[in-house]
Image (cartoon, coloured by chain):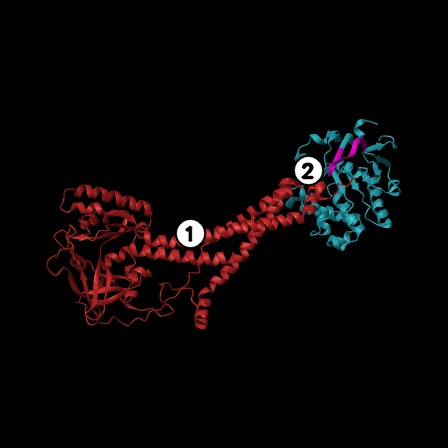
Chain colours: A cyan, B red
Amino acid sequence: MSKDDFILKAEGLYKSYRMGEAKVSVLRGVDLAVRKSEFVAIVGASGSGKSTLLHILGALDRPEKGVVSFEGRDLSRMGERELNKFRNKMVGFVFQFYHLLDELNVLENVFLPAMASKSVFGWLGSRRWAMGRARELLNELGLGERANHKPYQLSGGERQRVAIGRALMNEPRILLADEPTGNLDSATGNDILKVFERLNKAGQTIVMVTHDERIAQKTGRIITLADGKIKRKGAEA
Amino acid sequence: MFVVVVVMTVITGLVRDFKDNNHKWVGDCVVGTESLVGFPYYEDFIKRIDGTDFVEGVSAVVKSYALVKNRNLEWSSDAEIMGIDALKHSRVTNFGETLHYRKNDVADAFEPVYDPNLSGFVIGIDKWLVRDDKGKYSYEDSPYEVALLVSCFPLTSKGALAKAGTDLVNTKTFYYSDISRSGLAGVDGSFIYLPLEEAQLLCGMAGAVKRVSAIHIKFKPNVKLADGCEKVAALWKGFVEEKKGAEHAGLLDTVTVQSWKDYRREFIAAMEKEQTMLTIMFALIGVTTVFIVFVVFYMIVSHKSKDVGILKSIGASKADVIELFSCFAFLMGLLGSAAGAFGGWLFLLKINRIEDFLFEHFGFQLWDRTMYAIGDIPSVIDLKVLAVIIVSAVAACLAGAFLPSRRAAKLEVVETLQVNQL
């Protein structure tokens, strides 16, 4: 396998948090590599640092030590503007608690990333395209009829599908999902997983954090995080 | 916003009307002296400036004080007298328009209709008629015969009493020919206008070298006030130089050249001071508004920190977040001020009718019209004032929202989304 096949690499990641007087080390030298079109699950016990790792991989947080590189570019060397662009164009986030904007309807929530990256005039120019793309995504996710509903009018599974639609809006290179089924019942969770599987089959790279081994088994590779380090299981981890 | 628009429109209107009335009453420029002695050679100077390309009209004026007494009644009063050539003065000021009976016949302003051969006087309306509680005057169909004895202390060119040792005063009888309503309470309540030559005789200014108190000047329409006054001042300076050594030339040194604004400064300043006080008061309210907007936005940011985190997680920059809250503040200020301005405009449209209604049913008036020379309440919104108010409101909202917006922009995604689970 050539070096270029890795879309995301992490080397020697360290991260700790202060909890009162105590310092809790969450990541203690994590190394990780993800190939293009791979579907990876990060599992671990509660408090093992898997969410923290995901946020560092998606540039929502910074490591104390170590390097995260995306398509060969070191994220720590990126400026504020580049990081914003990275979060907007390269990565799509799906959170456990959906994190939709209640004031916006479903369609608006989905095209929000397209709006965030543009100036007022830029947005006016691309508005039609963005709305079309958002409708297309909602149709694919089975939410075409729900476009004008507000998030609080939807079920948990529907909200999570809206969140997936939002994450896919700008056609990101990688989808980072943090316990996407953690707040859903088993059947709904399976539906969401099927969406991920379908996306992955279409070539989407996905890194998913989950504490559910059953869910993790359905991914291409499982990375286990324990005591702030990766327990080697898969070939490249 | 509603209150600011209404109050500022009313007070601005009052000040504007007051200034306009002063301007019309004075003309553009005054070459004059405070001295009751007056100054000589005014005719020479009038000849000099009357032919210039920037002057439209010139009027010599005598100003002094007098005791007046109704010849047939036990009524007497003090008064300020102004001696003028009615026609010339009307070309410089709005004297003709202020008349009630001779409005279209200004040249005859001092000729009583009941006997044109008599020497007439024009009197300030508030010195002659009483306003009713709605501020209206009850005019006679035509002036009736009233003889007024006007007594002045004539002064020599050196300022001494001209008739010292004899009967001291000059007294002459004048007959009621018209009333003048300038819209200036102080003027209408104290001035009596007399023919220029008569006033000169009364005040001792009609000797071999005639004197006046002032020359009122009106500039041509395209002449800027400051430029015109500057030119007059330069001409006057040259004129004084020329007259050096002439008889009574020392009196010319007491003369100043002033624009109408400076000439009436002590009266205008009081009104402007009230306007300034109101502006300061509203500015303080503006500061309070900034604080209120700050608190509101601080609460909004606290409440919406998760949403800020969501936006930042999808790539919104700090500047985007500040822009978002600033746009919100801008719209809040713009729509709020537009709504307030609209309400104020509606209220101002009917303000005089509302006041009439309140007066008829409850006896309430904003100003007691028997005391104040105010007719209708000014209700025309000054667009400049409106623009300043709206811009200030928007600026206050933006200023109040600035710090909370910055705080929002600095929020960390992992903290706001509470995703720092280990």
Highlighted range, magenta: A15-35
Question: What kind of residue is marked 2?
Answer: Asn
Q: Nearer the viewer, residue B385 or A178?
A: A178
Residue A164 visible at all: yes
Label 1 crowding class (10 Å Cα cut-off): few <14, some 14-19, many 20+?
few
Residue indicated by mark 1: B276
Q: Provide the secondary structure element on which disc 2 rests.
A: helix
The percent position of residue B7, horizontal first and vertical second, equals: 46, 58
Marked residue chain, label 1: B
Q: Label 2 to label 1, Cα distance in Å? A: 49 Å
Residue A67: percent from left, percent from top: 75, 29
Residue A202 badge: none
Q: Residue at x 62, y 46 (%)?
A: B324
Side of B27 relative to A227 (left or right): left
* Label 1 SS: helix
In this figure, which residue is indicated by the disc labeled 2? A84
Instruction: Look at the image and tell me in which quarter the C terminus of chain B lies.
Output: top right
Q: Position of residue B335 (x, y in %)?
A: 56, 54
Instruction: Examine the residues drawn in magenta and state their main secondary structure.
Output: strand
The residue depicted at 19 percent of the width and 68 percent of the height is B116
